[in-house]
Structure formats: structure tokens, C-alpha cells
Amino acid sequence: MQQPQGQGPAARLGQRSGVTLTQRATRTGVGLHLGHSTTVQLVPVEEPEGRYFVRVDLPGQPRIDATLAAVGATTLSTELSQNGATVRTVEHLLAALSGLGITDVRLEVDGPELPLLDGSAQDWVRAIAQAGCQPLNHAVPPPWDLPDPITVQAQDAFVTAIPAPEIKFTYGIDFPYAAIGQQWHSWQPDQEDFATAIAPARTFGFADQIDHLRRQGLIQGGSLENALVCDHDGWLNPPLRFANEPARHKLLDLVGDLSLLGPFPRAHIVAYKASHQLHLQLAQALAAAAPARPR
């Protein structure tokens, strides 16, 4: 079956069944933080198994479920940990899967971090499109309504979920670099296609922070080929794909992180100057507010 345009979190609310891939897709690249080359195989499943990673390089090929229960470290990326194994920087791939409505897939990875590719979710979207998708014969959990607003906050950074008739995401950022400054972006999945509106937005960083982060063992695989970088004079590697590409990328991260919750609630989710940690704190709070599912 062809992937419908606009398929995403809102469209998933109306899905009658789960969706998996039609055939395998493969991507290889360098991880952002560890700098190691890894290969990911996106593998169709025949039964409803959800989205899960398998560390095929480790003895016993441990499974790591893409759920909130598996969340580990959240420093500049999202890491999942289960069965003695970890996989890091999962948010871009998870956003692509969620944005295209893929509910069930086996993700085989031969290392501890996913490839960054070009720094966006665009190549993951292309991989999914090339593989194609097909329905699975199982019911997707029905939509649920958020009863009351929920907010998590750290100083002036916050993420809040407000009851709404349809899913909508809004993200605001504010950085002391003229190239970025204050930016906002809103995305309503039933009105804009994830593949064109959000997926192409790349991760970004700051030239004066690179050495400090690398001394901490971070961004070992970052480069001008897989991240936007600016200094106080401007972008080092223009052009941008969108005038507000950084804000769109943060929204991409938010979708990937919140997808660990499972079905999204009907809500307007607004984030400002937030982090992976705050994204996932909101996801935990939403999980606590969700109605119990029938067994």
C-alpha cells in the first residue's frame, strides 16, 4: 500500500490497524556523539510487535523496545536501554516512523548509536518510502482525550500539553546568536505532510561550543556535512532548508521523543527552549494521565 500524504500522529488517530513495512530498508552512517559507523536495517514484522531495536552486534542480540520504560540518558540525544544493551540518538528515526504512521517494525542496528545521516529525518523518510508500507491485522489503540493541561518546566524552559480537538505541535527557541535568535514553528499533522514540513530540518550547533562538547565525549561524529553550525557572525555552512530550520528541527526531536509514549493524545503540545529531558518528562506525565487500556 502506498503511504498516504499527511500520514502522521494525527492520521494515526484514525488508523484502524497497525502499519509495518513491505520490505527491508538499510542505512549506514556515522553516529553524532560516538563517531562510529553503524548500519540500521528496518525490517517488516508479521505480527504486532510495536517498534523495537535489536543490537545484532551483541551476544544474544538483545531487544530494546522503543517505549518510555526503556529511556536512559538524555544528554543532547535520547538513549534507550534494556536487556543490558543501549542504543543512542534514536529520536530522528522515531520521528520519521511516527510521522509516516509506522506502528510496528524491527530495527536492527550493529552498534550503540544510530547514524546521524544528514542531521535530519529526511533520509529515514526516504528509506521508509522506498520500502513501502502495508497494514497489519491488529487494532491501533483508540484516541484519548487529555482531561487537563499538563506542564513540565525547568527555569524558563517548558513543555506543556493543552487539551485540543486535534493534535498540534508548537516549538519556540531563543539563542544568543544572530543567525538564530528567537524562532517559532507550529505543525498540525492533518494539514501538513511530515516528509516535507518537518523531516528535512537538520540538527544544529555552535562553533564556540564544539571543543567543550568534544572534551566531554560528545559530538565526536559531528561535521559541517551532518549539522548546521553557526557562530556569532552567521552560519558556517549555508544555505538553510527553511528560514526557521532550527525551530523545525527541535519540533522534529519533540515528535520523536513523545512517540515513545505510544498513541498521542488530542492536544496542542507547546515547547519553549526545551530539551530531550523535558520532552520525556512530559511524555511520562502524559502516560500517567492516559486512560487505562483494556487488556
Image: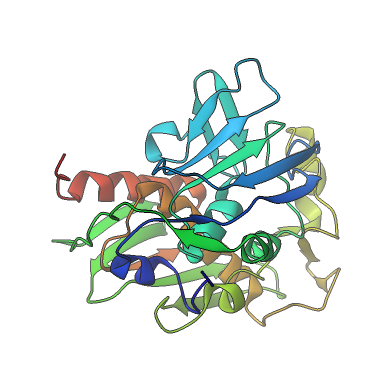
Q: Residue furthest top?
A: 59
Q: Tell me what residue is drawn at x 52 percent, y 78 percent.
A: 193
Along the line of sight, which residue is nearer the eye, 120 or 28?
Answer: 28
In the displayed structure, would residue 266 be above or below residue 279? Answer: below
Instruction: Determine the image quadrant of residue 207.
Output: bottom right
Q: Tell me what residue is drawn at x 66 percent, y 27 percent.
A: 56
Q: Tell me what residue is drawn at x 58 percent, y 28 percent.
A: 86
Color style of the picture: rainbow
Instruction: Determine the image quadrant of residue 217.
Output: top right
Q: Tell me what residue is drawn at x 73 percent, y 33 percent.
A: 216
In the image, 280: left or right of 16?
Answer: right
Residue 209: % across, % down? 76, 50
Along the line of sight, which residue is nearer the eye, 193 or 101?
Answer: 101
Q: Is residue 273 visible?
A: no
Q: Is residue 104 visible?
A: yes
Residue 45: % across, % down? 50, 44
In the displayed structure, would residue 265 be above or below residue 40? Answer: below
In the image, 19: left or right of 95?
Answer: left
Residue 250: % across, % down? 55, 63
Along the line of sight, which residue is nearer the eye, 21 or 273?
Answer: 21
